[in-house]
Every structure is written in structure tokens, then in C-alpha cells.
Amino acid sequence: MEIDLPTVWAGLIAFAVLAYVVLDGFDLGVGILFPLFPKRHDRDIMTNSIAPVWDGNETWLVLGGGGLMAVFPVVYATVLPALYMPIIVMLLGLVFRGVAFEFRWRTTRGSRSWDVGFWIGSTLAAFMQGIALGALVQGIEIANRQYVGEWWDWLTPFTLLCGLAVTIGYALLGATWLNLKTSGELQAHARRLSMVTGVVTLALIGVVSLWSPFLNANYFDRWFGWPTAFYSALVPLLLAGCAFALWHGLTTDKHLQPFLAALGLFVISFVGLGVSFYPYMVPGALTIEEAAAPDSSLAFLLAGALVLVPVILAYTGYAYWVFRGKIDPEEGYH
């Protein structure tokens, strides 16, 4: 049986992007929430909760970006020029938050300034990721396999809404992570923030979901046409189930359930994007088959991915297993 290599690689790239969102999303969310925790001691515990894993979480961003360049070079060459500004600002935000994360521990007098830097870097990175996603959903002008749009096409009311949705969504992930990993007053405050950010996230998901089908006729047919609407209806039903699990977990003082429910909101929303996009890599412009590199290249790269991806999954899982449980407030990051 012949393997459809372009589709396999599209699935691998999608998995890498999803893994980045669900793993790096909560540690970006912790940074986004920094201003809501004014005590230095609380912020130390918050950073301790992500210190063992935050570097490794960004591995998936490198894998997704590098894989896209190697496997779907046309997509890389057309999408990148359309999104230069948000991608550059996102990367600068990630660099700045990384520097701030380390330097906040090296000074007492300047720690508050670095905490502000950590918040700004985290928020910028999250907001620009949402804008880039929104720009891709609303469509990128491509002709003759080249980007033909304007420099500021990425900046629209819809992309700004998506940027806000991703930022608040990451804050929800961060709040539920803190609910899972901390205790005492810090955990109680994180639980309250989880409820607020959960409500806002669900509202923004609803607005984006109702707006998106009117951006592209293919989206509208996929969500409201028959018989695809029957299967697409599962997505909002599953979202409702995750919303109930989030509410139930927070109101009954569960620790793991709210975090898993928040992750579920992102996973199901990502599936919803897949429902809208498939079989396109760039909606309305490039299909998976059109954008893929030659099969010989895909096969060669797949051999490496079959080794690399399990290794990344193994060390990521091991790191989370070793550092499982609640954070000891008396232990520090060194």
C-alpha cells in the first residue's frame, strides 16, 4: 500500500504545532498573569512551577517551523513574507521573556523590572501567535506561488480578535496550571482567575467561530453545508463538554481536571481549524499536495522524524514525570 507522504507530513506538522500550543501555552500564560500576582514570593513560586519544562516546551516550535520549511517549502516561502512583522515580534518576545526569566533571579533591586519584561515578552509572543493564526484563517493572497498581498494585510479587526483570544486562552492555561501546581492562597487566586479567563476564553472562541465561516465560502460550506454540518456539529458539542468539565473542576476544588479541560478547549479548537482548512495548507490557495516537496525528500525526512519525534516525546514526558506534584514554596530555582 502506497503511503500518502504529503498527508502524513501535514499531520506531523499539525501535531508539532498543537504540541507547542498546549505545552508552551501554559508557561506563556504564567507570564501573562504576572501583574495579577504582585508579591515577589508568589512570582518566584510561579516561575519555579515552569522552570524545569519551559525550555523543552519550545522544542515543538522549532520542529514545526523547521519541518514546514523542509517539507512544505512553498508554504514557508509564501506565508512568511505575509507574516514577517507578527513572527518577528513573536520571536523577539520569546527571546526577551527568556532573558527576563533568567535575569530576574540574578538581582533583587532590578527584579521587578525583569518581571515586567517577562510579562511583556510572554504577552507579545501570545498576542502575535494569535494574529498570525487569524491572518492565516482570513486568507493570504497568493498568485503564481508567490505572496502578492500588502505589508499590513495581517492587521485587521479579525486578526486582533484572534490575538486577544489566544492571549486570554493562554492565561487560562496558565491559571489552571498554577491551580494544579501550587497550594494555599496562590492556588485560590489562580482558581478564581481560571474561572474569569475561562468565561472570557469561551466567549472569544464563540465570536471567532461565528465570524470565521463568513470569511471564506469553503468554511461556510464545511460548517453549515450538508452532510458535513452533521460531523462539524461535534466540535461545539465537545467544546461544551470541556467547558462543563472546567467549571465542575473549579467549583469542586479539583486540581488536574481544570487543566485538562482547558487543554481540551485548545485541542478541540485546533481540530475545528483542521475541519475548516483541510485539504488546504494555505486556505483557498495551496493544497497539501500542491505545497509538498518531492516524495523522495519527504521519505528521507520522515525516516529522521520517526526517530526524532519519539525521542522528544520521551524526554518531555520524563521531565513532567520527574517534576510532578505540587511546588515546594521553600525550594528555589538555581
Image (cartoon, grey):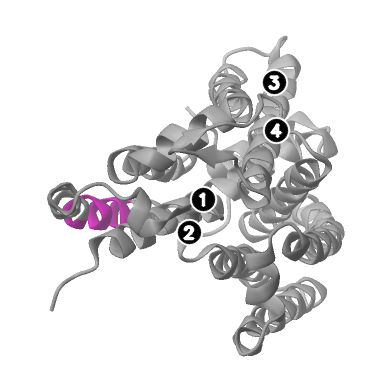
Mark-to-mark CA distance, 2 and 1: 7 Å
Kindly state the secondary structure of the residue where label 1 is placed: loop
Q: Nearer the viewer, mark 3 or mark 2?
A: 2
Q: Are marks 2 and 1 in contact (CB under 8 Å)?
A: yes
Q: Earlier in the sequence, mark 3 or mark 4?
A: 3
Residue drawn 37% across and 43% down? 68
The quarter of the displayed image where residue 43 is located: top right
Residue drawn 54% across and 55% down? 22
Q: Is residue 259 above or below residue 142?
A: below
Kindly state the secondary structure of the residue where label 2 is placed: strand
Looking at the rendered structure, which numbered label has been put on residue 153? 4
Viewer-nearest residue: 310 or 111: 310
Under mark 3, the amino acid is Gly
Q: Say whether residue 196 is left or right of residue 128.
A: right
Q: Earlier in the sequence, mark 3 or mark 1?
A: 3
Q: Which residue is mark 2?
A: 280
Q: Give the extent of the magenta segment.
A: 306-315
Viewer-nearest residue: 332 or 237: 237
Residue drawn 32% across and 56% down? 313
Q: Are marks 3 and 2 in contact (CB under 8 Å)?
A: no
**Rendered-image quadrant of the N terminus:** bottom left
Mark-to-mark CA distance, 4 and 1: 16 Å
Q: Say whether residue 208 is left or right of residue 132.
A: right
Q: Which residue is mark 3?
A: 117
Q: Which residue is mark 1?
A: 285
